[in-house]
Image (spheres, grey):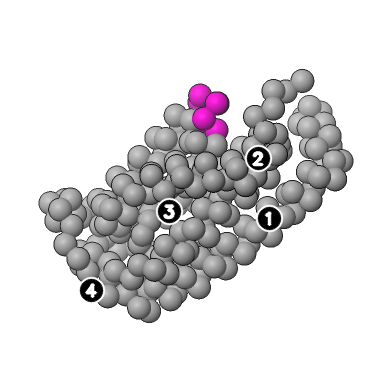
Amino acid sequence: MPKFLAKHRALWSKRDFTISVIFGFLTFIASLVANFFSGTYASSRASSSVTDLILSNLPVVNLDFIFVEGFAIFAILVTLICLLEPKRIPFVLKTVALFIFIRAIAVSLTHIGPFPTQAPIDESRIVDWFNFTGDLFFSGHTGLPFLMTLIFWREKILRYFFLTVSILFACAVLLGHWHYSIDVFAAYFITHTIFHISKIFFKKDFQRLNETPT
């Protein structure tokens, strides 16, 4: 515990770190607002569904607990991982915000209706703020864990853990027919690009993330 508090004290005493976290947090909140409006807009403009080679040959399996509770657990774990090593906070916040912003743009441009056969999702009021019927391209459930895989690539345990989570979520959204196969496959390529853009935009935060503890 003293070592944990010392890490926080040392970083939060630095003005540039504090400003970076505040900027990251505000950007993250702004990205959630953009996500809400883009998802609402895309859902109101959703066209008919399209055929899908994979979904047409996959039975519908209700993995709603992975889609909802599983994603909530994933978000909590990422938060805890950042709190344990506060140097991770700025880059993770800003990169996730960039991911959500870019996805919001993609969602706003793509208005394909959901696949006709879907497993039902028992959505709470909170989930309604983040999940919409028309926000399909690209899959956030697949992309965000893969983004964590890339961010924590140097930490072997976290790398393989988040990669496993990404694959698990990808299988869940396909089996539940909640995403088209292109939404899932494209997520890996787009997320990889977002990560490298973030490394350029937030170079100092990325360097801090990978600093060797003294």
Q: Is 47 placed above or below 180 here?
A: below
Is tag 4's residue or tag 2's residue first in the polypeptide sequence? 4
Distance CA(mark 4)–CA(mark 2):
42 Å
Distance CA(mark 1)–CA(mark 2):
17 Å
Distance CA(mark 4)–CA(mark 3):
22 Å
How crowded pointer 4 is (Cα within 10 Å; few <14, some 14-19, many 20+) is rated as few
Q: Quadrant of the N terminus?
A: top right
Q: Which mark is residue 203?
A: 2
The residue carrying mark 1 is 25
Q: Quadrant of residue 160?
A: top left
Is tag 1's residue or tag 4's residue first in the polypeptide sequence? 1
Query: Of all residues shown, which one is farthest toward the top?
Result: 214
The residue carrying mark 3 is 140
Q: Position of residue 91 (x, y in %)?
A: 64, 43
Q: Residue at x 15, y 53 (%)?
A: 53
Select label 4 or label 2 by which is in front.
Answer: 2
Q: Amino acid at mark 4?
A: Ser
Name the secondary structure under disc 4: loop
Is tag 1's residue or tag 2's residue first in the polypeptide sequence? 1
Q: Amino acid at mark 1?
A: Phe
Q: Residue at x 35, y 40 (%)?
A: 167
Residue stretch rendered in magenta on the structure: 152-158
Is tag 4's residue or tag 3's residue first in the polypeptide sequence? 4
Q: Residue at x 57, y 62 (%)?
A: 31
